[in-house]
Amino acid sequence: MSNLEEVFKVGGLPTITFVEPIEYPSLVVALRTPGRGVVIEGPSGIGKTTSVHRALKQLNLENVLVLSGRKLSDIDLIYKLPEMDNVGIVIIDDFHRLTNDIKSRIADYMKILADEERKDSKIIILGINHAGQSLVNFAHDLNNRLEVIQFEANPVYKTLQLLEQGEIALNIELNIKNDISEASHGSFYIAQMLAHQACLDSGVLESKEIKVVTTNSFELVKGKVFDRLSRSFKDRTVHFAQGTRVRREGRAPYLHLLYWLGMSDEWTLSIDDVLRKYPDLKGSIVQVVDKGYLETLINENEDIKAVLHFDPVTKLLSVEDPQYVYYIRNITWSSFAKNIGFLTMEFPCQYDFALSFSGSERTVAEALFNSLSEMQFEVFYDRNEQHRILAEDVEDYLRPIYMTDAQYVIVLLSSEYPKRIWTRFESQQFKERFKENAVIPIWFDSVPESIFNESTRVGGYVLNTSNEIFPQIEEIADLCRKKIAEIRQTLI
């Protein structure tokens, strides 16, 4: 006789429904090799911890010290490990949460243990993806002295095996077994969680004397699990998606990072990869990553930190909790975005604004770029594009930006503007867009009105060069923000 909570476990290490992941044989060999350091990396809920404990038991190596990078009481002991003798088998979980100083000490210690082929001491590291690489970064000659085992998403037949073992133990047949296996995306934990809910809904609380075939609706089971998780995760998800300040008309970089993470099969998001894949959000993403806003947002909020981790060195954003993976994968993102204050997750152009100016007005242009970028807009500013322009035909590169790729062109009309070759070229590209109400002129008051007569047909802003420039820049940026917000509001 088995109880439901013993079969499909949503807490603790599974026993009845333990399934060896495909990496299990490699793990056993690595654990029994004297002195050799072992790093098991992969997303949460994939079976790393369970497999390590099962393999150690199989090898009769059960006198194990388990430490965690999450526990303050353990961190001091982890730091002191290299000073101890005969530490036995030590598992360091959540290795990615340790400081670089401690990671470096452990890397050096693992190298010594491997060189001496110590039988009395062994370090086992558990961490998210690229935990092994982070060790090698601190000790480059550790690479050949380390066994890195990557736990990837388990294949469908493995999660089905888990569910079938549970069916046998409870003497039932899950009518939505295939749906559960597919929805788990290779996570043993998520499979356990969904199966647990399905049994609750069917009144299966322990083993049945006569076999029972469940009649669950998968959508109902999925919805109940999502609603339960929402009570725990919704507030922190809203906080992260809104960032340090809600910019409802901006490009919502935090929201998009979370959305892409939810869609990722690996449960880990490479910032470098998404910048290549989504160039229309490059500026806003770079803004929050390079200025440390993303790292600060996570590290200064314990609720967010409990489910997300960002490594500023590898630029990887990872999920810490398998339940959270399930939650963000089942959010209706377009509705979620609007409900928390954003106007849209879709944008008609690669850039919200493109700046056109003469080189003599770079100080003003850069200040305007910074203000608009802080508002989480995508802004074309030539200095940020120099590496892309290299070896390109400059005219071919710039032409579409001013003709179609920017929703608005902001043109700084100083006395030098009509004298420069490139500003004349740029103005030729966007001059027809005055008729589309897509050009925002900024007139310098030191310039005679007759020079830019055509531009006066549309609304713009007069920059008073006798007054402080930067407060006026902030005013211009805010007017641009309101303009684009009004346009996007009409599209909702």
Image (cartoon, helix red, strand yellow):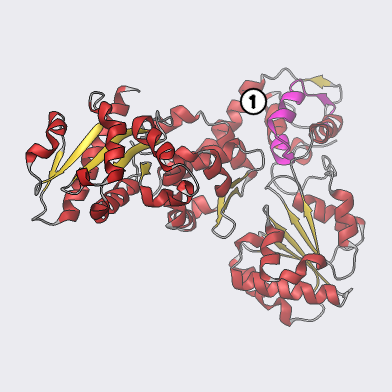
Is 10 in the magenta?
no
Q: Residue at x 49, y 30 (%)?
A: 333
Residue 63 relative to residue 313: left or right: right
**Quadrant in which the N terminus is drawn:** top right
Q: Nearer the viewer, residue 351 or 148?
A: 351
Q: Disc 1 residue type?
A: Val
Q: Is residue 307 visible?
A: no
> Which corner quadrant of the image does residue 159 belong to?
top right
The percent coordinates of residue 324 (x first, y second) are 59, 41
Q: Residue at x 57, y 60 (%)?
A: 313
Q: Nearer the viewer, residue 358 or 107?
A: 358
Position of residue 247 measured from the top left corner of the image (x, y, whole percent): 34, 41
In-image side of 458 versus 306 (left or right)? left
Where 55 sits versus 136, above or below? above
Q: Residue at x 84, y 30 (%)?
A: 164
The quadrant in which residue 27 appears is: bottom right
Quick one: label 1, few (<14), some, or many (20+) residues within 10 Å?
Answer: many
The magenta region covers 169-192
- Tell me what residue is drawn at x 50 percent, y 47 percent: 391
x and y percentages locating residue 22 in the rendered image: 84, 44
Please tell me whether residue 130 is drawn above or below residue 85 in the rendered image: above
**Residue closer to the observer: 489 or 67:** 489
Which residue is disc 1 drawn over?
221
Looking at the rendered image, the quarter that the C terminus falls into is: top left
In this picture, residue 38 sits left or right of residue 333:
right
Give SS at disc 1.
helix
Magenta stretch contains residue 177: yes
Question: Residue 316, image x and y in percent?
Answer: 58, 52
Count the labels in the image: 1
Q: Quarter-wise, where is residue 277 in the image?
A: top right
